[in-house]
Amino acid sequence: MSPCPGASHSCDLGLPKRLKRRYLPTPHANRTQTSAACWPRRAALYCASAIVFLAVTPGFGEEFVVGGSAHPWTESGITPGGVIAFVEDISSLTEGGEAIFTVEEGNADWIVPVRLDPGVNIALGLLDRGGSVDINLSDNQKDADELEGIINGDHRVAIDRKWVDGRALINNGVTLFVDLGARFGVNRIVFYPRMTPQFPFGNDFMRSYDLFVGEDENPSLAFPDFSESDNTDTTVVIEIDAQFVRSLALKSTLNAGFEIDEIEIYGTGFVPEAVYESDPLFLDDASVWGQIRWLEAIAGAPEDSSIEVRVRSGADDTPDDYYRQIKVGGVVTGRSPNDAFGNLLTRASYERLLRLDEPVIKQTDAEKWGQWQLVENGQTLELPAPRQYFQFRIDFTNATLTSSRALAQLAFDFSSPPVDGLFAEVEPSTASISETTTFTFVTLVDNDSGREGFTRFDVETPTRITALHSVSLTDPSGTVTARGDFGAVDVGEMLPRSSGEIILTEVDDEHFSLTMPRVDQDGASIEIVFDSAVFRYGTRFRGLAFAEGSTLPLLTEGGNATSAIESDDLLVRVSIGSTVAGPLKLSPSSFSPNDDGINDDLQIDYIVQHLVALSPITVHVHDLSGRRVRQLVNTDRSSGQYRVEWDGRTDDGNLVPPGIYLIAVEVRSDEGSQRRLRQTAVIY
């Protein structure tokens, strides 16, 4: 059966693993100009009915959408395991006359894990899914055609263990093993001998057996899930509670002869795991990346299903290297990129050998491709750039038979870069945690192709800079062509601020932005000297260059930007420690909240350090008896420097009486809770 547009039933499980050749578009065929019709202008998250729709404005670039007429799912990737269904109208999937997924009208072309048709034998096509069938006999007693014949619907071929003249067989303990190639919700297993006019062996059924089922590739044979020692049924039908099953074993427990024509397996519900992996998607130009987004529909309880999307970028259309293990005498002696006939392994031949249980290896070509990165719906991509190829992988996971998710219209933004590349390094490469440090950030421009260059350059920092000492632009000969000297940068300072031809346009807690004369020469460099602080081990600085009119930046990569710095990296390290509650400062030491305009508020500056993930933070005010009078902060924060003010009032809004009060900052992490205390005086 072909992919099922508008199908209200399950799709055939024998979907081809390879859907179409790698997509190579005609010039500009893959580029869709951004317009208000593609995605709404403002960001919003809709959770109406059972659809999750994240809509945001793409940057001033272009948009590539997989799923739809331009790039259908069936022509843009593969489905390892073959358990993805392609459905034009997801609302047509019903149960008892009710739609399983509820989506907004007009959203079409979905992918969803296969939902089993109770009448479809899922043993058919298991070899195409990477499954297998085997028997615990010596190689000279096995017949590959007979083994395949019991799971392909061919009633002329069977596993023949009948007693005939001149052939004595030991059948007690003979076991058939079936690996479905993926897990399915199985509820019925059927097996029988041949019963056709040509092969009338209806009386040669298995008279005593044990049945074992398992969720992994090999079922446990410790205890049977179903056992029958006196079977009288020619066609055995075993009903089991619907459960996720990948493998089964059928064991004869009597020496009597038998044959098996077919083992049929039936099920219900959604499969528990499914994968869609796109081809390397070719773009007309090496590109920088913007946002990624998709439509998502949910069946069942949201907590019972999930989707994980991973992405990577590269320089050619072969992201992976494939190898075959070489064995001598059963011992691995090496590996080869060729198959046994000397042909270079490809993705198709690797998949074929994998289905045959051959020892093959797949690994990313690290020289030309980045590693897979897990992304969230709506996030900005942080992939190596500029790159001309993009690839994504979608992993579906369902915890119950009635829960699943569907995905449509996966889109990402991309744009041509301002230059070919940016290599940067920073010094010092080590710093004292939480202490203000003067950093020198140098960026070298790679622009052999003569791209248009940039006039905007940002630097991401772990906290707000307190000073921008200098910004210098240097041409390839080493001559300074522009320079700005700024000095201290105050929190309340009005921007923009100019020095020479350099303009400081924006400063916040995470970055600062500069405008400068156009930088487009290959070998030109930018040196920026500024004051900031780091709050955890392994803080990475980063520069961003923007082409004219674009919001999609080219990111700096760590590398040798200048001989004056030896780090060749953007990583700054600090001493590893466990003190997550850093310095706490109060200003002024005493204050008078009487609205006279003088010292009316207490300024509380606190530092959180050594955290690698968001952690709960509280800032409370206590009197000397330990009673809490005010909660100022109760939220999750990452490492950084923060400020909050206290106006001298309680949680009820009343002014506190004069006296001594304690300011407590508490950080809860995996290492436990830590608290910093400082006292202040309230006077009137």
Image: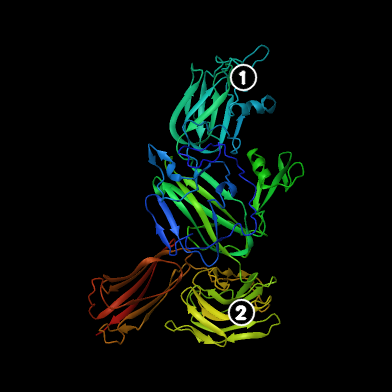
Q: Nearer the viewer, residue 516 or 658?
A: 516
Vertical relation: 268 (above or below) 673: above
Task: Give the labeled residue for mark 1.
Answer: 161
The residue under the point 49% across, 72% down is 535
Sequence order check: which comes first, mark 1 or mark 2? 1
What amino acid is at disc 1?
A: Arg
Query: Does residue 673 appear anywhere in the picture?
Result: no
Residue 561 rendering spot, x and y as whole percentages: 66, 75
Image quadrant in which the C terminus is located:
bottom left
Secondary structure beneath dot 1 equals strand
For the rendered model, the colour scheme is rainbow
The residue under the point 44% across, 51% down is 106
Q: Nearer the viewer, residue 476 or 169?
A: 476
Vertical relation: 434 (above or below) 233: below
Circles 1 and 2, Cβ within 8 Å, touching? The answer is no
What amino acid is at disc 2?
A: Arg
Q: How crowded is mark 2: few (under 14 residues within 10 Å), some or many (20 or more)?
A: few
Residue 621 rendering spot, x and y as whole percentages: 30, 73
Vertical relation: 578 (above or below) 470: above
Image quadrant in which the N terminus is located:
top right
Residue 77 rendering spot, x and y as whole percentages: 59, 48
Q: Distance between the residues labelled 1 and 2?
A: 82 Å
Q: How crowded is mark 1: few (under 14 residues within 10 Å), some or many (20 or more)?
A: many
Q: Which tag is nearer the camera, tag 1 or tag 2?
A: 2
Vertical relation: 290 (above or below) 234: below
**Residue 95 placement, left or right of 206:** left
Query: Does residue 146 appear anywhere in the picture?
Result: yes
- Find residue 518 and name its label: 2
Residue 317 rendering spot, x and y as whole percentages: 66, 55
